[in-house]
Amino acid sequence: MPTKFIFVSGGVISGLGKGVTTASTALLLQNRGYRVTPVKCENYLNIDAGLINPIEHGDPYLCEDGTEADMDMGTYEKFLCKNMYRHNFVTMGQVYKTVIDRERNFEYEGEDVEAIPHVTDEIIKRIKEAGEKEKADIVVVELGGTAGEYQNALYYEASRILSLNKKNSVVHVHVSYLPTPSHLGEPKTKPTQLSVRTLNSMGIQPDFIIARSEKPMDSRRRARFALFCNVDPEHVIDSVDLESPYESPLYLEKQKFSEKILELLELSPKKLTLSAWGHMTDTIKAKKAKHITIAIVGKYFATGEYQLRDSYAALMDAIDHASWAQGVSASVKWIQAEKLEKGDLKDLNDAEGIIVPIGWGPRGVEGKILAINYARVNKIPYLGLCYGMQLAVVEYARNVLGLPGAHTLECDADTAHPVIHMITGQEEILKRRAYGGTMRLGRWECRVKNGSIADESYTKHHAYDDAKDKIVGERHRHRYEFNNAYAKQFEEGGMVLSGRSVVENLVEIIELPKFVHPFFLGTQYHPEYRSRPLRPHPLFLEYIDACVKRG
């Protein structure tokens, strides 16, 4: 069967939920028995999201193959419950670099290289290759930004070119905003009319309009969309604000969205199975018997709640997934690490758990170490992720092993006790300022120590890749590691080095025994990137359970 393509564009304002719409569309079609893969077309000229400040563009999402991508990759993985890879993520920087490299290699044989057709051809090539690599029946392509931006015009042009002579093979879904100004009290369709007119000016006629709004759309608004946007009234889909984005596929399917798409693509509307997804959303909305507060001690906090969540998006999702599965509600208390450095730790008093997540550099480090010490001494459940594991090692070295000034070489190049040091080969990389994509990235296998907290967690939730040999594959994103020269000292001092990488024998997990602390565990890898709403990560499940028991 020839591959079919669905393009999802946005209008009026950003942040409407194109990613959720793309993921929901893909989920519905996948659950009808089709092989589906999503592709995100990002506007920026960065090659990937690895060097972007998380406050600027949110938490870079780490894929299984080491791709540092846009947060939408995480949305796709969570909805589809399958891994995304490099071919699912396209940036304009990747496209331009490929075209320019080809020109420098004389691969265009003296042609004058132009945006059209050479850049658009490269975009189309990447979209098609994603479908080929996944053997997909349908590729769902999310076009970054909004219609009318100069940055994404070539993506739109590529979608138009791809649709030529491909009758019944390409569908265009336009997600737009239906605002209800408070001083008027009625929804206004004009913003969407204008964004559709912009699409029309590029030679694109949307097949569907997804109307994002605070309240359900009425028949009058539907009729006006149909008339002024030249769209079948049955293809104007309501997308009201919901309690959880995971409800979106169910809400769209109440309007037979996937069935209508398949009709346009001339594909059979196979039976749809959404029972597990529906049960999960019911669990999310169910009243919770207990509530816990988790203190996240970090530094990538901006003004406003929305930005805070985006800076640590994968972590927040992992907490949610595990909390829902445990039947508890969890709220997060954001604590600036730098404020703790003044010695006032009262903000940690009412937390049932403490997490120190990913981070870079010396800013706020001593505050994080104070928070870790507070969690260890007061037996508050602690989870350290990447930097949070490394700083837990530093704290233990200083305060338990009696190694004054112990530190990570990332923060103190002259420390007498470099308990965290640089990965072999990274020093030369940094001298060349080759920062992009040069860390230890992606999935690496870890062997877990029998009888440890980590082992009990993976075993209990059937999460091992190889249960016999206690091996699990987890995702990494770092340049520094536990210094094995100190391993014996730590083990003799009571810390359990409960996980090591299969290939390099590097420490992946540290923990304290349960008779010392109810839950004190750190991972060099990032379990948050492998959490799914239908399959929460076992370490988060057990961490939340420990927080509940403390509460």
Image (spheres, rainbow, N blue to C red):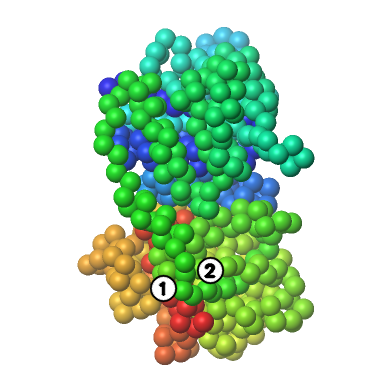
511, 441: nearer the viewer: 511
Up-down: is 84 above or below 476?
above
Up-down: is 398 above or below 385?
below
Q: Residue at x 52, y 11 (%)?
A: 109
CA separation, marks 2 and 1? 14 Å
Q: Dot 2 lies on which element?
A: strand
Q: Quadrant of residue 258?
A: top left
Of the residues shown, which amino acid type is indicated by label 1?
A: Glu
Q: Residue at x 70, y 68 (%)?
A: 336
Q: Position of residue 459 (x, y in %)?
A: 29, 70
Tell me the tag on residue 294: none
Up-down: is 485 above or below 62?
below
Q: Position of residue 94 (x, y in %)?
A: 55, 32
Of the residues shown, which amino acid type is indicated by label 2?
A: Ala
Q: Dot 1 lies on which element?
A: helix
Tell me the tag on residue 330: 2
Q: Position of residue 210 (x, y in %)?
A: 53, 32
Q: Residue furthest left?
A: 468
Up-down: is 85 above or below 410?
above
* 387 sits left or right of 334 in the view: left
Q: Residue at x 43, y 20 (%)?
A: 170
Residue highlighted by disc 1: 542
Query: Could you tell me if residue 79 is visible in this image?
Result: yes
Q: Number of callouts in the render?
A: 2
39, 386: nearer the viewer: 39
Lower position in the chain sequence, tag 2 or tag 1: 2
Q: Position of residue 446 (x, y in %)?
A: 36, 64
